């Protein structure tokens, strides 16, 4: 099993380097064939805290936005929101680690993951992209799904779904036994239990279909 950034997981599935990956949903149209696995996903029913647009100006005044290199879905999501919800047309600029080392030169940027907990403190305006999607559509948002690029045996699927279910139902035990370096001041258990929403239910399937329609 490989542990990678979302964009790397997506690329490995596209190039057939792996059979199954927890991949950003924005990559699904790039796969010739795909099957969504398990009854669980990485989603949010409101603010998720780790997928943000941070800015020095209100969203309606933003002229340039840097796009986080680590996530395809957040990049697509901010474009959808810009076009259809905020009604803005900024210049899109590619971000990299060097950009984030000198944030004074950034007007606005999409950021994901651990760096959101610290970087949000340097910007007066913070927009949670999952929360903005909810305002726009009234639906939750799906960031990533367990996805296969080929047929998988039913026996494996059953066991894999059971394993995923166990993880979702035992988050506190998972956190207690993790060696993950938690950002200072972050309550990982609270984040995993309350900010991420896992069931891949009908509302999330509807939201995913709508998102894929927008990015088609």
Image: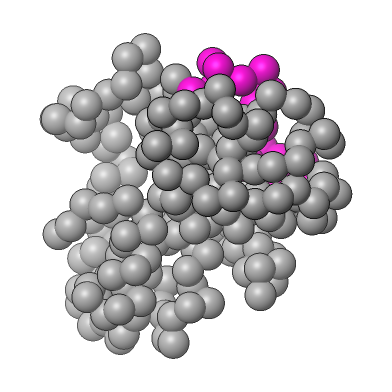
Describe residue 171's horizontal placement relative to residue 212 as left or right: left
Residue at x-position 26% and y-position 47%: 166
Residue at x-position 38% and y-position 58%: 7
Q: Is residue 211 visible?
A: yes
Return the x and y of residue 153 as percentages of the image width and height: 23, 82
Q: Quadrant of the N terminus?
A: bottom left
Q: Is residue 209 visible?
A: no
Coloration mode: one colour
Residue at x-position 40% and y-position 37%: 98
Residue at x-position 14% and y-position 30%: 179
| Magenta stretch, residue numbers | 119-136
Q: Quadrant of the C terminus?
A: bottom right
Compared to residue 47, the image places residue 13 above or below, namely below
Q: Main secondary structure of the magenta part?
A: helix
Describe residue 105's horizontal placement relative to residue 147 as left or right: right
Please check the rendered image and state whether residue 128 is part of the magenta-colored stretch, yes or no: yes
Q: How many dots with numbers? A: 0
Return the x and y of residue 162 as percentages of the image width and height: 26, 58
Return the x and y of residue 198 as percentages of the image width and height: 45, 47
Q: State the image quarter where residue 163 is shown.
A: bottom left
């Amino acid at each position: 099993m490989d542990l990678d950034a979302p964009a790397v997981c997506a690329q490995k599935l596209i190039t057939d380097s792996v059979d199954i990956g927890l991949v950003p949903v924005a990559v699904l149209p790039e796969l010739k064939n795909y099957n969504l696995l398990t009854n669980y996903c990485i989603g949010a029913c409101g603010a998720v805290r780790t997928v943000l647009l941070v800015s020095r100006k209100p969203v309606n005044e933003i002229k340039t936005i840097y796009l986080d290199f680590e996530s395809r879905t957040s990049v697509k999501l901010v474009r959808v929101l810009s076009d259809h919800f905020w009604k803005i047309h900024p210049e899109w600029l590619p971000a990299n680690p060097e950009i984030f080392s000198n944030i004074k030169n950034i007007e606005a940027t999409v950021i994901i993951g651990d760096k959101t907990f610290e970087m949000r403190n340097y910007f007066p305006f913070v927009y949670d992209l999952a929360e903005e999607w909810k305002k726009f559509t009234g639906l939750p948002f799906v960031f990533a799904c367990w996805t296969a690029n080929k047929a998988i045996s039913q026996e494996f699927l059953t066991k894999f779904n059971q394993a995923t279910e166990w993880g979702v139902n035992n988050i506190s035990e998972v956190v207690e036994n993790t060696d993950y370096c938690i950002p200072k001041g972050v309550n990982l258990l609270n984040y995993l239990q309350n900010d991420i929403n896992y069931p891949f239910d009908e509302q999330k399937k509807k939201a995913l279909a709508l998102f894929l329609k927008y990015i088609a």
